[in-house]
Amino acid sequence: MKKFGSVDEILDFAISREEAAAQFYTHLAQRVNRTWMQEIFRTFAKEEEGHKATLLAFKEGKSLEPMAQKVLDLKIGDYLVDVEVTSDMDYQQALIVAMKREKASYRLYTDLANRVEDAGLKATLERLAQEEAKHKLRFEVEYDEVILADN
Protein backbone atom coordinates (compact mmCIF):
# COMPACT_ATOMS: atom_id res chain seq x y z
CA MET A 1 0.00 0.00 0.00
CA LYS A 2 1.10 3.54 -0.69
CA LYS A 3 2.99 5.39 2.06
CA PHE A 4 1.23 8.49 3.29
CA GLY A 5 2.98 11.49 4.77
CA SER A 6 -0.02 13.14 6.40
CA VAL A 7 -3.65 12.77 7.38
CA ASP A 8 -4.58 14.98 4.41
CA GLU A 9 -2.82 12.57 2.03
CA ILE A 10 -4.82 9.67 3.46
CA LEU A 11 -8.04 11.63 3.18
CA ASP A 12 -7.31 12.76 -0.36
CA PHE A 13 -6.51 9.18 -1.36
CA ALA A 14 -9.73 7.88 0.21
CA ILE A 15 -11.75 10.69 -1.39
CA SER A 16 -10.35 9.80 -4.81
CA ARG A 17 -11.27 6.14 -4.22
CA GLU A 18 -14.85 7.13 -3.34
CA GLU A 19 -15.05 9.28 -6.47
CA ALA A 20 -13.82 6.32 -8.53
CA ALA A 21 -16.37 4.01 -6.86
CA ALA A 22 -19.22 6.43 -7.57
CA GLN A 23 -18.10 6.71 -11.19
CA PHE A 24 -17.82 2.93 -11.45
CA TYR A 25 -21.38 2.35 -10.24
CA THR A 26 -22.69 5.15 -12.45
CA HIS A 27 -20.88 3.61 -15.42
CA LEU A 28 -22.15 0.15 -14.49
CA ALA A 29 -25.71 1.51 -14.36
CA GLN A 30 -25.27 2.79 -17.90
CA ARG A 31 -23.95 -0.56 -19.13
CA VAL A 32 -26.67 -2.87 -17.87
CA ASN A 33 -29.86 -3.26 -19.84
CA ARG A 34 -32.41 -3.72 -17.08
CA THR A 35 -33.94 -0.58 -15.58
CA TRP A 36 -34.13 -2.06 -12.07
CA MET A 37 -30.43 -2.97 -12.21
CA GLN A 38 -29.62 0.54 -13.36
CA GLU A 39 -31.46 1.95 -10.35
CA ILE A 40 -29.62 -0.34 -7.91
CA PHE A 41 -26.25 0.81 -9.22
CA ARG A 42 -27.27 4.47 -9.26
CA THR A 43 -28.24 4.10 -5.59
CA PHE A 44 -24.82 2.67 -4.80
CA ALA A 45 -23.15 5.51 -6.69
CA LYS A 46 -25.03 7.96 -4.43
CA GLU A 47 -23.91 6.06 -1.33
CA GLU A 48 -20.29 6.25 -2.47
CA GLU A 49 -20.76 9.99 -3.01
CA GLY A 50 -22.04 10.09 0.58
CA HIS A 51 -18.80 8.46 1.73
CA LYS A 52 -16.86 11.13 -0.12
CA ALA A 53 -18.93 13.78 1.68
CA THR A 54 -18.11 12.09 5.00
CA LEU A 55 -14.40 12.27 4.25
CA LEU A 56 -14.67 15.91 3.18
CA ALA A 57 -16.56 16.67 6.40
CA PHE A 58 -13.77 15.03 8.40
CA LYS A 59 -11.31 17.40 6.72
CA GLU A 60 -13.48 20.20 8.12
CA GLY A 61 -13.39 18.82 11.66
CA LYS A 62 -16.30 16.38 11.82
CA SER A 63 -15.82 12.66 12.60
CA LEU A 64 -17.86 9.48 12.83
CA GLU A 65 -18.02 6.89 15.53
CA PRO A 66 -17.47 3.27 14.53
CA MET A 67 -20.56 1.09 14.34
CA ALA A 68 -21.39 -0.71 17.57
CA GLN A 69 -21.57 -4.09 15.86
CA LYS A 70 -19.49 -5.60 13.10
CA VAL A 71 -21.36 -6.34 9.89
CA LEU A 72 -21.90 -10.00 9.08
CA ASP A 73 -19.77 -11.36 6.24
CA LEU A 74 -21.40 -14.24 4.36
CA LYS A 75 -18.16 -14.66 2.39
CA ILE A 76 -20.09 -15.61 -0.75
CA GLY A 77 -18.01 -13.27 -2.89
CA ASP A 78 -14.81 -14.86 -1.57
CA TYR A 79 -15.56 -18.05 -3.49
CA LEU A 80 -16.66 -16.59 -6.80
CA VAL A 81 -14.54 -16.11 -9.90
CA ASP A 82 -13.84 -12.53 -11.02
CA VAL A 83 -16.15 -11.24 -13.73
CA GLU A 84 -15.38 -8.72 -16.46
CA VAL A 85 -17.71 -5.75 -16.77
CA THR A 86 -19.53 -5.85 -20.11
CA SER A 87 -22.63 -4.20 -21.55
CA ASP A 88 -24.46 -7.52 -21.68
CA MET A 89 -23.70 -8.69 -18.13
CA ASP A 90 -26.45 -10.58 -16.42
CA TYR A 91 -27.59 -9.87 -12.87
CA GLN A 92 -25.40 -12.59 -11.40
CA GLN A 93 -22.29 -11.14 -13.01
CA ALA A 94 -23.18 -7.62 -11.86
CA LEU A 95 -23.63 -8.85 -8.29
CA ILE A 96 -20.25 -10.59 -8.37
CA VAL A 97 -18.50 -7.45 -9.60
CA ALA A 98 -20.21 -5.37 -6.92
CA MET A 99 -19.38 -7.83 -4.10
CA LYS A 100 -15.73 -7.90 -5.04
CA ARG A 101 -15.48 -4.12 -5.27
CA GLU A 102 -17.13 -3.64 -1.90
CA LYS A 103 -14.79 -6.18 -0.32
CA ALA A 104 -11.80 -4.30 -1.76
CA SER A 105 -13.17 -1.03 -0.36
CA TYR A 106 -13.70 -2.63 3.05
CA ARG A 107 -10.11 -3.87 3.08
CA LEU A 108 -8.82 -0.46 2.00
CA TYR A 109 -10.54 1.35 4.87
CA THR A 110 -9.56 -1.34 7.36
CA ASP A 111 -5.92 -1.13 6.26
CA LEU A 112 -5.95 2.66 6.38
CA ALA A 113 -7.55 2.65 9.85
CA ASN A 114 -4.82 0.32 11.09
CA ARG A 115 -2.14 2.71 9.84
CA VAL A 116 -3.28 5.96 11.46
CA GLU A 117 -2.79 7.25 14.98
CA ASP A 118 -5.36 10.05 14.94
CA ALA A 119 -8.31 8.64 16.92
CA GLY A 120 -10.94 10.63 15.03
CA LEU A 121 -9.60 9.59 11.64
CA LYS A 122 -9.28 5.98 12.79
CA ALA A 123 -12.94 5.97 13.94
CA THR A 124 -14.09 7.55 10.68
CA LEU A 125 -12.16 5.03 8.56
CA GLU A 126 -13.47 2.13 10.65
CA ARG A 127 -17.01 3.42 10.18
CA LEU A 128 -16.49 3.68 6.42
CA ALA A 129 -15.09 0.12 6.39
CA GLN A 130 -18.28 -1.06 8.04
CA GLU A 131 -20.39 0.89 5.53
CA GLU A 132 -18.58 -0.93 2.71
CA ALA A 133 -19.13 -4.24 4.54
CA LYS A 134 -22.87 -3.43 4.67
CA HIS A 135 -22.86 -2.88 0.91
CA LYS A 136 -21.13 -6.20 0.35
CA LEU A 137 -23.60 -7.94 2.66
CA ARG A 138 -26.54 -6.50 0.70
CA PHE A 139 -25.08 -7.90 -2.52
CA GLU A 140 -24.34 -11.25 -0.87
CA VAL A 141 -27.87 -11.57 0.51
CA GLU A 142 -29.29 -10.69 -2.90
CA TYR A 143 -26.99 -13.26 -4.53
CA ASP A 144 -28.03 -15.90 -1.99
CA GLU A 145 -31.74 -15.22 -2.37
CA VAL A 146 -31.88 -14.78 -6.15
CA ILE A 147 -28.99 -16.71 -7.66
CA LEU A 148 -28.26 -19.51 -5.21
CA ALA A 149 -31.95 -20.11 -4.52
CA ASP A 150 -32.41 -21.02 -8.20
CA ASN A 151 -29.70 -23.69 -8.04
Image: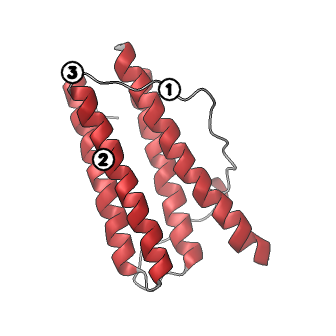
- The residue under the point 47% across, 68% down is 40
Please state, as top left, top right, bottom left or bottom right, where the N terminus lies in the image.
top left
* Observer-nearest of 133 and 76: 133
Label 3 SS: loop
**x, y (%) of residue 38?**
42, 75
Quick one: label 3 or label 2, which is nearer the N terminus? 3
Mark 2 burial class by Cα count in 10 Å: few <14, some 14-19, many 20+: some
The part of the image, by quadrant, that contains residue 80 is: bottom right
- Name the kind of residue labelled 3 in the image: Ser
Quick one: label 1 or label 3, which is nearer the N terminus? 3
- Name the kind of residue labelled 1 in the image: Pro
The part of the image, by quadrant, that contains residue 2 is: top left
**x, y (%) of residue 59?**
22, 27
Between the C-alphas of marks 3 and 2, the distance is: 17 Å
* Observer-nearest of 127 and 147: 127
Residue assigned mark 3:
6
Residue assigned mark 1:
66
Q: Which mark is residue 56?
A: none
**x, y (%) of residue 94?**
51, 71
Residue 64 to residue 129: above or below:
above
Q: Mark 1 or 3, which is nearer the eye? A: 1
Residue assigned mark 2:
17
- Left/right placement of residue 33 relative to residue 54 reads right
Label 2 SS: helix
Quick one: label 1 or label 2, which is nearer the N terminus? 2
Please state, as top left, top right, bottom left or bottom right, where the C terminus lies in the image.
bottom right
